[in-house]
Amino acid sequence: MNEAGAWTEERVELLKKLWSDGLSASQIAAELGSVTRNAVIGKVHRLGLSGRAKNPAAASTPRAASTPRKAPTRSPSHPMGGQGASQGGMTRGANALAPQYAPEAEPETAQEPMPSEDVVIPFSERVTIMDLREYMCRWPMGDPTTPEFRFCGGRSQTGMPYCSYHARIAYQPAADRRRDRSRVARG
């Protein structure tokens, strides 16, 4: 600590007095000068001055007897039904972000069929990582731990890492993913 903010015996005694009088660390720092609020807090901690005098204004005014509060009641028309009733209307845990309504069934639309995983790309057309070029599809094919592991190698779409076939597998619209997930859950 610099010389101006040194903790002399007089300053420590003044700190103890001001602390017991109930002044805040900021007020004590301003009173002492050349020390920061954090320096006051640190010194109070090191001195073990945890006991504080009660605020004289608050101690002299008697408190009114508190009346017991009635627990809030839930109206029967609550949108969540019975969920969260014991938690005061708050939903916690895995259901906190779940929709509070049943999602409407999306109408089935005619859509081009999703490509199946069993389409065979001849081994001679597949490429190793060393043979991949900027315009080639980077769809992995096979087990990466074996020497036969290759990439599709087909012509990739501009600015995309995959050919049009593999891009349809990799990039599915969110609505399609939700619909597929709901089919799996019902099935």
Image: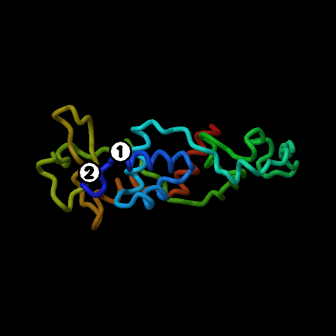
Q: Nearer the viewer, mark 1 or mark 2?
A: 1
User: Disc 1, disc 2: CB below 8 Å?
Assistant: no
Helix, strand or loop under label 2:
loop
Instruction: Compare marks 1 and 2 and give the one earlier in the sequence.
Output: 2
Q: Nearer the viewer, residue 180 or 121?
A: 180
Crowding near the residue tagged with mark 2, few <14, some 14–19, many ≥20 C-alpha atoms within 10 Å: few
Quadrant of the snapshot with the C terminus: top right
Q: Residue furthest left?
A: 130
- Measure the C-alpha gap from mark 1 to mark 2: 15 Å
Q: Residue furthest front?
A: 10
Residue under the point 80% across and 45% down: 81
Helix, strand or loop under label 1:
helix
- Across and down, in percent, residue 14 comes to 44, 50
Which kind of residue does numbered mark 1 sit on?
Answer: Glu
Residue 52, picture quadrant:
top right
Residue under the point 80% across and 41% down: 82
Crowding near the residue tagged with mark 1, few <14, some 14–19, many ≥20 C-alpha atoms within 10 Å: few
Q: Which residue is mark 2?
A: 1
Q: Nearer the viewer, residue 184 or 32?
A: 32
Q: Is 45 rendered above or below residue 136?
A: above
Label ID, residue 40? none
Q: Nearer the viewer, residue 187 or 20?
A: 20
Which kind of residue does numbered mark 2 sit on?
Answer: Met
Residue under the point 26% across and 61% down: 156
- Horizontal placement of 41 versus 133: left or right? right
- Across and down, in percent, residue 171 comes to 41, 56
Q: Nearer the viewer, residue 9 or 73?
A: 9
- Horizontal placement of 8 versus 3: left or right? right
- Across and down, in percent, residue 152 comes to 25, 49
Q: Which residue is mark 1?
A: 9
